[in-house]
Image (cartoon, rainbow, N blue to C red):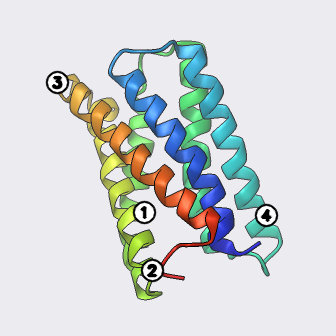
């Protein structure tokens, strides 16, 4: 299976979890229900990253490292939701780290000619930065905006993943 197809499979679930997480941020849904999809998505992306890390013909350490940023995000969100944790400042600061890493990753991906994936990295960088604002520095007045942005990014990510998994990604 080609690298972009495998990425697409993971992004379909990333899209689903971001939609659900966005709705959850807006105040709909239970913590434990949200946790289940976050755990599943974290596991799927972790397995993809492991595949790329240990089978270099399929991917690279760079691909694996970027994907692990997602895996850890969803596993952490799942654990916090399952436990009903209110104080998520540490997770928020992790999100700032990821936003800082995701921004140049978009530029590196752009150099390979994949404009679509580069744009996704920048959209995700903004999302992780928004999580830092909401959780890391606890600016709750942005709750609704972050919730809606999360859901919209989920739709974009899921649609992109579907096209990638289908083998119709135009920049390959």
Q: Which residue is mark 3?
A: 141
Considering only order in the chain, which callout, 4 or 3, is on the residue closer to the N terminus? Answer: 4
Position in image of residue 63 (x %, y %): 62, 70
SS for dot 3: helix
Position in image of residue 114 (x %, y %): 45, 80
Position in image of residue 101 (x %, y %): 42, 63
SS for dot 4: helix
How far apart, in angstroms, are the residues tagged by discs 2 and 4? 22 Å
Q: Which residue is mark 1?
A: 101
Q: Is residue 165 left or right of residue 102?
A: right
SS for dot 2: loop
How far apart, in angstroms, are the residues tagged by discs 3 and 1? 26 Å
Q: Which residue is mark 2?
A: 114
Quadrant in which the C terminus appears: bottom right
Identify which residue is drawn at 34% across, 43% down: 152
The reply to whether discs 3 and 2 touch (Cβ–Cβ < 8 Å) is no
Considering only order in the chain, which callout, 1 or 3, is on the residue closer to the N terminus? Answer: 1
How far apart, in angstroms, are the residues tagged by discs 2 and 1? 18 Å
Identify which residue is drawn at 54% across, 20% down: 81
How far apart, in angstroms, are the residues tagged by discs 3 and 4? 40 Å
């Amino acid at each position: 299976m080609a690298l972009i197809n495998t990425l697409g499979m993971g992004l379909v679930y990333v899209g689903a979890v971001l939609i659900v997480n966005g709705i959850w941020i807006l105040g709909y849904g239970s913590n434990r229900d949200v946790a289940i999809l976050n755990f599943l998505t974290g596991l799927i992306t972790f397995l993809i990253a492991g595949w790329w890390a240990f089978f270099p013909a399929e991917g690279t350490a760079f691909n694996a490292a970027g994907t692990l940023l997602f895996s850890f995000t969803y596993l952490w969100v799942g654990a916090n939701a399952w436990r009903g944790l209110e104080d998520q400042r540490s997770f928020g600061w992790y999100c700032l780290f990821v936003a800082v890493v995701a921004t140049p990753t978009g530029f590196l991906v752009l150099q390979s000619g994949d404009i679509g994936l580069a744009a996704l990295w920048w959209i995700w960088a903004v999302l992780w930065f928004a999580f830092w604002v909401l959780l890391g520095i606890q600016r709750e007045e942005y709750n609704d905006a972050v919730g809606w942005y999360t859901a919209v990014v989920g739709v974009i990510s899921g649609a992109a993943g579907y096209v990638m998994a289908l083998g119709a990604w135009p920049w390959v």
